[in-house]
Amino acid sequence: MKTLVLVFHPNITESNGNRYLSQEIKKYPNVTVHDVYAAYPDGKVDIKTEQQLIEEHDRIIFQFPFYWYSAPALLKKWLEEVITHGWAFGTNGDKMQGKEFLPAVTTGVDQEGYTHEGLVKFNVSELLRPLEATTNFVGAHYLTPFVVHGIGHQSDEQLTEKAKEYVSYALNPKLIAA
């Protein structure tokens, strides 16, 4: 299984959580880590390159921090531009069918905050419904998200452990659809 990790963080060098996750997973064979913000600092996405990357991999991980309970802007733009009619859906649009999609999300709020009784009033899975719907629309398999809550409260030792958990989870070939 070939895995593509699309990292959507506007400043990965200043991100403890996402930096730890991406540095750990890129150590493994059959994993391609693609820092999308670094690749397109001007925000102009190379659609053909991105589509080719998707076609070459079996499992696609969208790794990003939650910003106001959603994904960073470039992920939304990427979805709008890369997932096109005739390629991903519609007539002859079958290039994403059967692919596995896994969100890997970091949050600033602790896990208790992402409950119906907590600060946010929604859990992460509920807030990721648009990404799940998009995945379903193109005939791909949406996998249960990997979430690291309260990322700013984690020590280096905790982040190292979370990164190892991430790799174990994300590269598990028996991971099942949500």
Image (tube, helix red, strand yellow):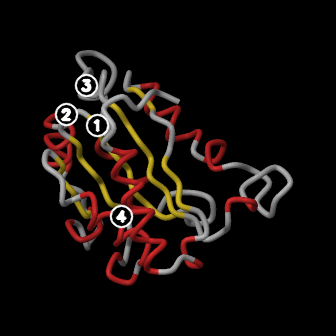
Residue under label 1, please give it: 59
Looking at marks 4 and 2 on the same chain, the residue that comes earlier in the sequence is marked by: 2
Would you say the residues marked 1 and 3 are in contact, meaning their CB atoms lie under 8 Å apart? no
The Cα atoms of the two marked residues, 3 and 4, are separated by 34 Å
Looking at the image, which residue is at 40% across and 32% down? Answer: 175
Which x, y percent locates residue 166?
40, 54
Q: Is residue 74 above or below residue 4?
A: below
Query: Which residue sits furthest bottom?
Result: 14
Residue under label 2, please give it: 1
Would you say the residues marked 2 and 1 are in contact, meaning their CB atoms lie under 8 Å apart? yes
Q: Amino acid at mark 1?
A: Arg
Q: Amino acid at mark 2?
A: Met
Q: Amino acid at mark 3?
A: Gly
Label 2 packing within 10 angstroms: few (<14), some (14-19), many (20+):
few
Q: Amino acid at mark 4?
A: Leu
Residue under label 4, please give it: 21
Q: Is residue 79 above or below residue 55?
A: below
* Lateral position of residue 66 relative to residue 115, left or right: left
Helix, strand or loop status at disc 3: loop
* Lateral position of residue 155 relative to residue 118, left or right: left
The Cα atoms of the two marked residues, 2 and 1, are separated by 7 Å
Q: Is residue 72 above or below residue 6?
A: below
Which x, y percent locates residue 117?
86, 54
* Lateral position of residue 29 relative to residue 148, left or right: left
The mark closer to the camera, 3 or 4, is 4
Q: Nearer the viewer, residue 140 or 26?
A: 26
* Lateral position of residue 4 relative to residue 14, left or right: left
